[in-house]
Structures are given as C-alpha cells and as structure tokens.
C-alpha cells in the first residue's frame, strides 16, 4: 500500500459539550487508500471525532480538512460515504426507495442511479428484500441497507461507525469483504469499531483513543516486531536454554514448554536450524504474534473498566 | 403519516356532524317555531362560523402536530445524520420540510373549510362572503404555528416543542378574548393588552380578521369567539408575514449550528 496525499488531516481538533470534553486534541493524518482503524473504549470520543470530520458537529477548537476541503464543506460530501452507528431510517420506505432517496441527495438520477442500486442490493445481499418496507427488516438487514446507502455515490472516503454491530458472523464476513473490495479500488476507509478482530483483519493502521486523545498508533500492514515463540524440544538441558538466548530474550520454562520472544521473523528458521544441528527433537514450535486485543489491553492500561 | 390519517378522520367526523346539524336545523326550522327571516339567517350564519371555527382549529392542530416530530425526532433517532452528511445544505433541509408541510396544511385547510361551506350551500344555499380573502388569512395563521413548530424542533425535544407551540396558541386565544371583552366593555387597557398579545402570537387575530369578513353586520355585533367585536388592524397581516419569516430565519439558524 502506498500512502500518498492525506485525505483526512486534522490539527488539535477539540469539542466540548458543556463541561464535558469529548474530544481533547485530535491530530490525524490519513493517506489515500488507507484502511484506518479508530479504536478506544466506549466514551473515548470516537463517534464525536467522526462527526467532527463529517461536519455534523462544529469543533470548539482546532482545524482540519477532509478531501482537501475545510471540515463541513458541502461540496466535499459528494465524495464521502457515511454509515452511522445503529443506522436507522424512515421505516415506511422500501430498501430500494431508501437507496433512491440517498442517491438523489447526492444528485444522482435516472438509469445510472437505478443501475447502481441494483448493483448494491446484490452486493449487500438484499436483492430479494428490495420491495419490502424497512420496518420488516431485521437488525442485520437494516445495517446492510445502511452500508449500501453509504456506498451509493461510489465515495472516495467512507466513514463506517461500528459497521458490524448487529450483524451475524456471515454479515460480518460480508462487511469484511466489502472493505477489502473498497481497498482494492483505492477507497479510503475510516473504521470506527470496538470489535478488535474485525479491525485486525481489515485495517492497515490503527490509532488508540482514550479520553479524546490519541495515545498510540500502530501499523498493522508491516510485520510487527516482538514475536512470541513457544517450543517443546527434547532433551531439554540447561545448555540448550543458555544457547537459545542468542536468538531472543525473556526465556521462561514451564515443564516441557519453553517460551521466549524474538525481535524479528528471520530469527525463527535460524533458531530451528540450530536446534536440529544440536541433534534435538522438535515436537512443537509455535509462533504467536501479539493480537490487537493484547495491544489494546496493554495500551489502555489497567485503569479501564468494561464499558 | 399517522398524524395525517388521524387529522383526516377528525375532518370527516367534523363534516359529518356539522352536515347533519345544518340539515336538520334548516329542515325543521321553519315548521317548528315561526321566526323572522333575518333571525333565521343570523342563526345560520352563526352555525356556519362555528363550523369554520372548528375547521380552523383542526387545521391549526394539524399545523402544529405534523412537523412537531420531524426535526427533533430525526435528531433523536439519528436519521438526520445520514441526510445532513449528504451534499445538501442544512437550510435546504429545513426549507424543504417547511414548504412540504405548508402545502399539506393548505390542502387540509381547503378540505375542511370548503367542506363546511359546501355542506351549508348544499342544504341552505347560503355561502359566507369574502371566502377568497378569509382562506389566505387562515392559512397565514396556520403558517405561524407551523413555522414555530419547525423552529422549536431544531432545539427542543418533541414533547417540549408541542407544549410550547400549543402555549403560543393558548396565549393567542386568551389574547383574543381579552381584546374582544375589552372592546365590549370599553376598556382601553384590555384592548392594548390583547393587541400586545396578538403581536407575540398573531394566530387568533388572523382568525378574527378572517371571520369578520365572512359575517353580516348583524352577527358582527354578537360577542364571542366566532365574531369580531374587536377587529384587528389589517397591519396585522403584514406583521404576521414578518412573524413567519422571522421564525423561519430562527429555524434556519437554529438548525445550522445544531450538533447532530
């Protein structure tokens, strides 16, 4: 992935609601084509940040641009898609009417709009429900209709606020596939989610937000340093343990199992060759990258309580 | 949708009850008690005005309730977020709603008032004069409440908004009575208070102006909500147009800066 010009750029964005500081200091730069994850516990200011970028809320301080235009500018919105958290719409409309309405708000008309609606209904698996009113839709169907609504204008930048909430595993896979297709087409995706598995599977880069501030940034596109290795070899003598120290650090032993950390991936085959060379039998060699969930817990610290 | 349906049912009920009353009054009138023709006519006029008064009241209720949930409800449910993030200005959203609701209210007003007038004409042949002037005045009155309801929706929650707008109607109603009674008993202070209230909420003054035109000189002398012992000045029309425009500007401003 090549990150070129920034499609989202903010400087010290701040938003206060009365005495509550929802967003304290948001400075972001998101490149074109990036799949960007915005992570944080409930109440960290994620949705407020997203609304600031969309111009739904005015900032109390700071500034920013989206697609080269100042925050909230109307023209830039023709190239933006947005799926709000808990998408809802007038339940008297059918799926097709919903998409037609939103297409028209983007200035789309006629056969081109109907073609785009056909395409999207198939893509979000609602083609057989297009003529049913939204009040008959399940939560997952409504969410998928909302996703189609966010993509109606073939946007360059899509904001998805908890897109998989209310979806079953198949629905989640569908969203994941759609995000990948967007990436292939060069669309930038801003993903707001607390489902870390989803984020891990789709995002190139994530930031962790707490109390309205970015406290850590993490690239998921490059292999992460600090890899955990688990080994079961025999015979396990002190000389072997001492010899392993040249490949990594933090060696611990629990019965037959050795755990250690290596700093880069190329150490793993070297370590295996060294063990074989010494005439040891390898029964198990497992590599565990740190999951996003482990990062999350570490970065957010112990002070966090379940939200 | 439900509000429109309920309002239409109310309108049909009004027309059914009113039509029955006019039919029997006119049919039984001459045979039951011999009355001079001018009294019979005054009674018919009073009944017609009562019908138009209720028609106007239903229209006003429709004008308040139709848009009361439109903006505040869409903000509360989050529906507005997907609309306001599209390339349409917030002013367009408010003006679009205002215009659509105004057309619906105008349609409703025509349905109920012309329904009343047609029933009277059908059974008695009587048509109140100056209808063409009265109807726009009634629509202007409904527009004041409609616009207040939209403006309130940009800042208040639905129920609070409904209470506030009906409050405006209640103030106008009592202001009208104060002015009328003030005129009957010759109290200038009451007239001034009534006029001042009309400036804050002109809806009742517009009804009195409209109904005054539709009455014969005899009925104009009878005090009550259907008559107009105190006829508002025609400047009230200009004031009301200004009132609607100013309220609309407040609505546009209120929504433009609203956190959604």
Image (cartoon, helix red, strand yellow):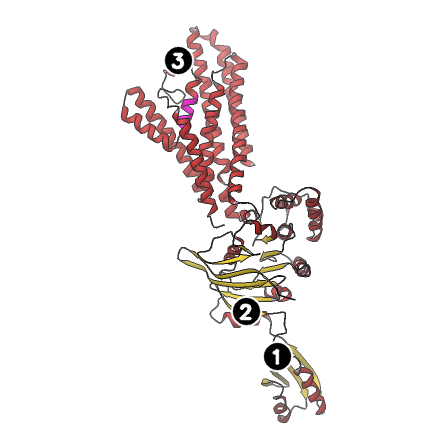
Residue B16 appears in the rendering: no
Q: Which mark is residue A301?
A: none
Which residue lies at the image location 65% right of the left edge and 52% below the top edge? A154
Q: Report which quarter residue A156 is drawn in.
A: bottom right
Alpha carbons under labels 2 and 1: distance apart: 21 Å
Membership of B148 in magenta stretch = no
The residue sitting at the bottom extreme is: A239
Name the dominant secondary structure of the magenta segment.
Answer: helix
- Span shown in magenta: B203-210
- At x 27%, y 26%, the residue is B189
Chain letter of mark 2 equals A
Q: Nearer the viewer, residue B201 or A153?
A: A153
**Mark 2 vs 1: CB contact within 8 A:** no
C-alpha span from label 2 to label 3: 83 Å
Mark 2 = which residue?
A217
**Residue A206, image x, y percentages:** 57, 66
Residue A228: give its label: 1
| A219 is higher (above) or lower (below) than B260 | below
Kindly state the secondary structure of the residue where label 3 is placed. helix
């Amino acid at each position: 992935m090549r990150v070129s010009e920034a499609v989202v750029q903010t400087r010290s964005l701040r938003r206060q609601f009365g005495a509550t500081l929802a967003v304290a200091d948001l400075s972001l730069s998101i490149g074109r084509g990036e799949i960007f994850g915005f992570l944080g516990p409930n109440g960290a200011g994620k949705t407020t940040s997203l609304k600031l970028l969309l111009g739904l809320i005015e900032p109390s301080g700071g500034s920013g641009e989206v697609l080269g235009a100042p925050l909230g500018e109307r023209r830039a919105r023709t190239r933006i898609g947005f799926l709000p958290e808990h998408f809802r719409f007038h339940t008297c409309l059918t799926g097709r009417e919903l998409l037609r309405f939103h297409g028209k708000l983007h200035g789309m008309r006629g056969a081109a709009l109907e073609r785009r609606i056909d395409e999207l209904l198939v893509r979000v698996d609602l083609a057989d429900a297009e003529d049913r009113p939204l009040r008959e839709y399940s939560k997952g169907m409504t969410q998928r209709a909302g996703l189609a609504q966010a993509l109606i204008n073939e946007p360059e930048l899509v904001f998805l606020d908890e897109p998989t909430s209310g979806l079953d595993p198949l629905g989640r896979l569908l969203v994941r596939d759609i995000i990948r297709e967007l990436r292939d087409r060069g669309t930038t995706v801003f993903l707001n989610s607390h489902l870390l598995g989803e984020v891990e599977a789709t995002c190139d880069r994530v930031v962790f937000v707490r109390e309205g501030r970015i406290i850590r940034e993490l690239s998921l596109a490059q292999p992460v340093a600090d890899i955990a290795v688990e080994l079961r070899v025999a015979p396990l003598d002190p000389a072997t343990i001492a010899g392993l120290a040249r490949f990594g650090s933090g060696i611990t032993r629990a019965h037959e199992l050795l755990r250690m950390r290596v700093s880069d991936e190329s150490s793993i085959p070297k370590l295996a060759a060294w063990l074989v060379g010494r005439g040891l039998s390898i029964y198990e060699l497992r590599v565990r990258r740190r999951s996003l969930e482990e990062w999350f817990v570490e970065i957010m610290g112990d002070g966090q309580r379940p939200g | 949708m439900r509000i429109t349906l309920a309002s239409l049912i109310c309108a049909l009920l009004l027309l059914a009850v009113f039509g029955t009353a006019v039919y029997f009054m006119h049919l039984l009138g001459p045979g039951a008690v011999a009355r001079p023709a001018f009294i019979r006519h005054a009674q018919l006029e009073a009944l017609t005005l009562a019908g138009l008064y209720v028609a106007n009241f239903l229209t006003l209720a429709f004008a308040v309730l139709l848009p009361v949930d439109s903006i505040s409800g869409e903000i509360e449910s989050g529906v507005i977020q997907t609309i306001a993030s599209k390339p349409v200005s917030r002013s367009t959203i408010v003006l679009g709603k205002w215009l659509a609701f105004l057309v619906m209210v105008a349609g409703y007003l025509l349905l109920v008032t012309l329904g009343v007038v047609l029933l009277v004409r059908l059974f008695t042949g009587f048509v109140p004069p100056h209808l063409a002037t009265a109807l726009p005045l009634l629509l202007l009155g409904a527009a004041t409440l409609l616009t207040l309801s939209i403006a309130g929706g940009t800042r208040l929650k639905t129920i609070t908004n409904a209470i506030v707008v009906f409050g405006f109607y209640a103030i106008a109603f009592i202001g009208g009575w104060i002015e009328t009674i003030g005129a009957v008993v010759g109290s200038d202070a009451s007239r001034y208070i009534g006029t001042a209230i009309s400036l804050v909420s002109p809806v009742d003054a517009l009804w009195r102006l409209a109904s005054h035109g539709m009455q014969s000189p005899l009925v104009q002398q009878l005090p009550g909500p259907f008559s107009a012992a105190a006829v508002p000045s025609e400047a009230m029309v200009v004031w009301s147009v200004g009132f609607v425009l100013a309220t609309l500007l407040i609505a546009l401003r209120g929504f433009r800066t609203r956190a959604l």
